[in-house]
Image: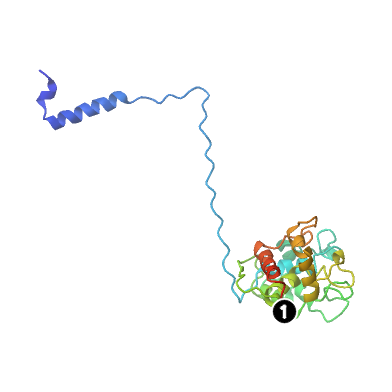
Amino acid sequence: MNLLNLFKPEVAALLLMAAVITACQHEPFIPDGWVPPIVPPVDTPSQPLDPCDPDSVYFTNTILPLLNSSCAIPGCHDAGTAEEGVILSSYSQIINTGEIEPGNPSDSEVFKVITEDDPDKIMPPPGSGVPPLTPDQIMDIFTWIQQGALNNGCDGCDTTAVAFSSSVFPLIQTNCTGCHSGPSPQGGLSLTNYAQISASANSGILMNSLNGTGGTVPMPFNQPTLSDCAKRTVQIWIEDGTPNN
């Protein structure tokens, strides 16, 4: 007698399936010397920077390029010269050698020297060829220290309404004027007013220098290059015809 006849058809079918599955189970065949492929990890996209708070002053956006342009230059407070042991070309050096007291501008050495009454002590020193910091630039440093002297940054890219006075000139002042001003500007190029900046833009020198193209050295010299947003802002102004607006 067939034993499957002892069970209901449904049960018999299940038993037969289980027997087939059990019979098919076996260890997988692995050839000698086989190495499992390396699967590269999936890159986690970096978190975008927060939008800029108009009431905050950010280190990477404003303070670092300002100090790089006006202070951390050859012969002064770059890493190669380190005048009086002060180096102002990176966050840690600015905090430590610049004797920054977060939250307390009046006790911070950097702020003291840029607001010094004595012409022999004020920075940048008169006659150095580097223009003095503007009241707005001094206030930016004051506010940054007062807000905790953080190593922070933000995504402030807004190219919807590019204008020379509000978009391009502040970029040049912060990043370039320290080297490209005075009686002996670097490379013989002054960038202190609209006429000079527009002339360099129309000749192609400005964008070539910012991009490091056309045989030029990327600017700012020996410092981080301008952000893509900043370069795009200047390029838009140039494409608009370099208006004095």
Q: Which image quarter holds the C terminus?
A: bottom right
Position of residue 137 in the picture relative to residue 74 (left or right): left
Percent across and percent down for residue 123 are: 82, 74
Percent across and percent down for residue 46 are: 56, 56
- Specify the quadrant of the image occupied by residue 117: bottom right
Q: Measured along the vertical axis of the image, is residue 141 above or below residue 229?
A: below
Q: In terms of secondary structure, where does tag 1 sit?
A: helix
Of residues 204 and 42, the one drawn nearer to the viewer in this rendering: 204
Position of residue 101 in the picture relative to residue 82 (left or right): left
Whether residue 98 appears in this view of the structure is no
Whether residue 190 appears in this view of the structure is yes
Q: Which image quarter holds the N terminus?
A: top left
| Residue plotted at (54% across, 49% down) | 43
Residue type, label 1: Asp
Of residues 211 and 106, the one drawn nearer to the viewer in this rendering: 211
Percent across and percent down for residue 136 are: 72, 79
| Residue plotted at (71% across, 69% down) | 238
Using a 10 Å C-alpha cutoff, classify the residue at mark 1 as few (fewer than 14 neighbours), some (14 to 19) or many (20 or more).
few
User: On the image, numbered disc 1 is attached to which residue?
Assistant: 136
- Specify the quadrant of the image occupied by residue 122: bottom right
Scheme by which the image is coloured:
rainbow
